[in-house]
Amino acid sequence: MPGSVIGINMTYGYPGQSSRQGDEVSRTRPVSTASANINFGAPVVQNSDGSVQAWAATNVAADFSGIAMRKVKAAKIYPTQNFGYYVAGEPCDVQQRGGISAQCAWGTPAVGSTVYVRIAVVAGTSPTGAAIGDLGASNETENCIALTGVKWSSTKDARNVAELTMIARQGV
């Protein structure tokens, strides 16, 4: 049997998958009807009515309320259900504290290093394929902001998935 079938490398799972049990705090919130799709493993913002929405260019670090968890409800996006998303009106599971897997879109995460979220995409400065709300491991002045109480807790695997830890509870 070929090694590619069995696998010889450990990965960090799929974006949005809780990675450490025991310190996880999570909530289920409805996705705002005005929100774009919220990808598994993406940062979310909680609104005053309790709904959540996808990260936007106008958000600041204090708006961060957690990471959208990977909860496969049905195979409606088969065969890519491990990289799914929540749509407007659906309940969204949000992890507010603890370890979770997320895509590191740029930079090289190191244990204990700062997690940044993209607020702007600038031609010639931002990496190819960059999007608002991407999480990364290096500071691009004026293109991203540092998240408070959130640290990378691993390097990234071949799929750019790494583990991050929310040290302090985010959101309500």
Image (tube, rainbow, N blue to C red):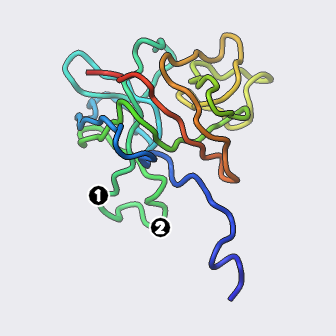
Helix, strand, or loop for circle 2?
loop
Can you name the residue that lies furthest to the bottom here? 1
Q: At 51% from the left edge and 53% from the top edge, which residue is drawn?
A: 14
Residue 108 in which image quadrant: top right
Residue 22, percent from left and from top: 34, 42
Q: Nearer the viewer, mark 2 or mark 1?
A: 1
Tell me if label 2 and label 1 are in contact, CB under 8 Å: no
Residue 92, percent from left and from top: 29, 40
Give the residue number, with chain letter if any, for mark 1.
73
Q: Nearer the viewer, residue 162 or 98?
A: 98
Q: Check disc 1: other Cα within 10 Å, few if <14, some if 14-19, many if 20+.
A: few
Locate the C terminus and report the quarter of the image it occupies: top left
Residue 89 in which image quadrant: top left
Q: Is residue 29 above or below residue 70?
A: above
Helix, strand, or loop for circle 1?
loop
Q: What kind of residue is marked 2?
A: Pro
Q: At 67% from the left edge and 50% from the top edge, which residue is drawn?
A: 157
Q: What kind of residue is marked 1?
A: Lys
Seen in the image, is 4 located left or right of residue 149? right
